[in-house]
Amino acid sequence: MLGKSIAIGQFIPIESPVHRLDPRVKILVSAILIVALFIVKEWPSFLFIGCFIILLTITARIPISYIGKSLKPILFLLAFTLVLQVFFTPGDYIWEYGFLHVSREGLIRGLFIIVRLCLLILCTALLTLTTSPVELTDGLESLMSPFKKWGFPAHELAMMMTIAIRFIPTLMEEADRIIKAQQARGADFESGSLIQRAKNLIPLLVPLFINSFKRADDLAIAMESRCYRGGIGRSRLRVLKLRMADILFFSITIIFITVVILLSWFIW
């Protein structure tokens, strides 16, 4: 199934030190890692950050198969990015054939972008794989709660973001079922020109949008039937509390990322 091949949006309910961390800490650490990946510009920095993310993945006891699943949906984007950078970046050409030129600078830049995208996806997937939708909603709302005094809808926005992430695998499974049903009726999504294949997607997009709206309507009815009225006066079964392990992990992450950024700027 196509939806099961996507790791982002899924949650693995197992016992691990990363799963036990406060969701607010995991959200902040993920945001810090993502920002750091855009700040650093040297290969040693990527190596250290990548090792840190892999160490977290191993500590979280995430199966190796889920790492591949998180990267599989962007393989075409990675290949397309590499081709653009390799053939259209001027510099020291290492291979030429007609109008095609492969530059050393383009190859290095393409690999650099690919590694950055892979680490971004792994970081995001690690957050959703180790945090349940309820914890993710509570963590996002807690982090955005200081803005409530200015009328910011923290709870509603956190709920919308969590539902959107949670339903990514569901929508992909729905698209996979529609594709198989259309192929059984003779539809062809693989052959023909690019324009023809784009036109062939119309029988896929129309039922997918209809089913998405129907699923959203069913979800709204289910929430209303359970007396959901937003975040006003809402109580929680589990109140988020920072533990010493959360503070220690967050402090270690801040120190580690700070050292990597400083080394990237002044030494490497």
Image (cartoon, rainbow, N blue to C red):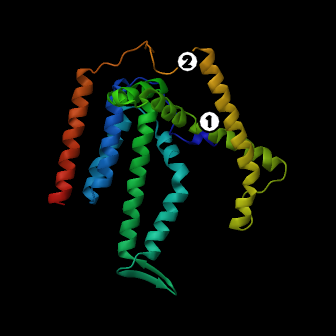
- Where 222 falls versus 151 (above or below)? above
Can you say which quadrant of the picture contains the N terminus?
A: top right
Q: x%, y% of residue 134?
A: 47, 23
Most extreme residue toward the left, as rendered?
Answer: 266
Q: In which quarter of the image is residue 153?
A: top left
Amino acid of disc 2: Tyr
Q: How many C-alpha atoms fall within 10 Å of the one at disc 1: few (<14), some, or many (≥20)? A: some
Q: Quadrant of residue 175?
A: top right
Q: Is residue 206 left or right of residue 220?
A: right
Distance between the alpha carbons at the discs numbered 2 and 1: 23 Å
Q: In the image shown, does 73 or 227 lie closer to the viewer?
A: 227
Residue at x-position 25% and y-position 24%:
245
Residue at x-position 27% and y-position 26%:
246
Q: Earlier in the sequence, mark 2 or mark 1?
A: 1
- Where 63 falls versus 33 (above or below)? above
Q: x%, y% of residue 249?
A: 25, 31
Q: x%, y% of residue 105?
A: 35, 73
- Where 21 falls versus 66 (above or below)? above
Residue 170 is marked as 1
Q: In this view, does 159 lie to the left or right of 246?
A: right
Which residue is identified by label 2?
228
Can you say which quadrant of the picture contains the C terminus?
A: bottom left
Q: How many C-alpha atoms fall within 10 Å of the one at disc 2: few (<14), some, or many (≥20)? A: few
Q: In the image shown, does 24 or 51 lie closer to the viewer?
A: 24
Q: x%, y% of residue 106?
A: 39, 72
Q: Is mark 1 on a helix, strand or loop?
A: helix
Q: Is residue 153 left or right of residue 257?
A: right
Q: Is residue 157 left or right of residue 263?
A: right
Q: What element carries label 2?
A: loop
